[in-house]
Image (cartoon, rainbow, N blue to C red):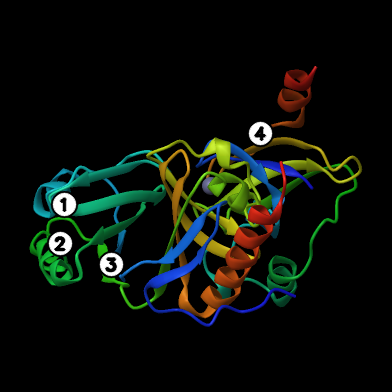
């Protein structure tokens, strides 16, 4: 089982308290009727399916209830960091340096 | 498969050398969602709301537990629910919030006894030691969301939605018997 750090609770907790919620930092177009069908399709359906460090959303469902973001390596399944929703996307360099 | 408990009305469900499991009388329960400066709301309700997730306060007949960054559950006597709701409504215009009577939603079960902590580990995903005496959490117990209150070292309360209660109570009942049958 994974242990996940909830940035709101500030506790590292068992995976079963959380639900996965897909790729992070997907921005909904400000004005959906102004975008092309291709752009709208891309927003709705197209994801990167990253092999390696993946920016993704999680929700502390059985806990504080909040959505937050995480960087997880999809090969090793190790979390590099978790951070509050709305916070800027941390660079991979800043995360891997911290890990050394 | 766990046997379902049939007793959902207040009363003792299991009482062994390990622990006692009791369905409590239903308290008045309110869900509060609010953000920003809470002082006006706290004054109106007559309680200082705990700021940290898992923190608890008790004042003027209200018990509060912080569940999330902007979420609290308030317990009070059933006859006091209307007064608490009205107190919130009185400051609604200046401080919009959501204060909803959820008294009809959950079953509360009290657990105490020398092996209450071991009984908790039957369903709790996290280590009960991470929840301090006098604190609480919304967490996960054998597949269900529960609100857990730790009242003493070996005293807990669990709030669970009615529809999940028969399963959880059945598990606790079985656990009480199993732990009592164990020779340590
Ligand atoms: Zn949380």
Left of A56 or right of it: where is B165? left
Give the structural element (helix, strand or loop) at label 3. loop
Q: Tell me the number on the disc at residue B88.
A: 2
Q: Are marks 4 and 2 in contact (CB under 8 Å)?
A: no
State which quadrant residue A38 falls in. Answer: bottom right
Question: Same chain, marks 3 and 1?
Answer: yes
Chain under label 4? Answer: A
Horizontal and vertical percent position of residue A66: 52, 53
Compare residues A21 and A27 and report the one nearer the observer. Answer: A21
Q: Nearer the viewer, residue B41 or B167?
A: B167
Tell which subunit mark 2 falls on: B
- Image point (91%, 43%), residue name: A75
In the image, residue A3 lies at what x, y percent? 72, 41
First-in-chain label (3 vs 1): 3
**Residue B182 x/y as whole percent:** 71, 50
- Of labels 3 and 2, the one closer to you: 3
Q: Which residue is mark 4?
A: A90
User: Of the numbered discs in the image, which one, if any, rests on residue A67?
Assistant: none
Q: Are marks 2 and 1 in contact (CB under 8 Å)?
A: yes
């Amino acid at each position: 089982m994974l242990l996940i750090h909830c940035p709101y609770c500030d506790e590292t907790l068992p995976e079963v308290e959380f639900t996965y919620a897909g790729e992070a930092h997907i921005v909904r177009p400000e004005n959906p009727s102004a975008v092309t069908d291709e752009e709208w399709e891309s927003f709705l359906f197209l994801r990167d399916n990253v092999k390696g460090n993946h920016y993704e959303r999680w929700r502390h469902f059985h806990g504080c209830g909040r959505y937050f973001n995480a960087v997880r390596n999809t090969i090793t399944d190790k979390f590099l960091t978790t951070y509050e929703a709305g916070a800027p996307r941390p660079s991979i360099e800043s995360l891997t340096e911290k890990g050394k | 498969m766990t046997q379902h408990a049939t007793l959902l009305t207040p009363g003792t469900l299991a009482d062994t050398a390990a622990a006692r499991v009791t369905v409590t009388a239903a308290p008045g329960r309110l869900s509060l969602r609010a953000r920003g400066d809470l002082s006006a709301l706290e004054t109106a309700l007559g309680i200082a709301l705990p700021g940290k997730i898992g923190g608890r306060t008790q004042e003027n007949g209200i018990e509060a537990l912080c569940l999330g960054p902007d979420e609290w559950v308030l317990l009070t006597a059933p006859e006091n629910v209307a007064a608490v709701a009205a107190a919130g409504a009185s400051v609604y215009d200046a401080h919009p919030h959501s204060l909803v009577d959820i008294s009809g939603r959950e079953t509360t079960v009290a657990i105490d006894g020398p092996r209450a902590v071991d009984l908790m580990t039957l369903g709790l995903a996290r280590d009960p030691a991470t929840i301090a005496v006098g604190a609480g959490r919304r967490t996960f117990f054998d597949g269900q969301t529960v609100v857990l209150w730790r009242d003493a070292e070996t005293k807990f309360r669990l709030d669970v939605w009615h529809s999940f209660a028969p399963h959880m109570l059945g598990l606790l009942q079985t656990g009480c018997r199993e732990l009592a049958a164990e020779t340590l």
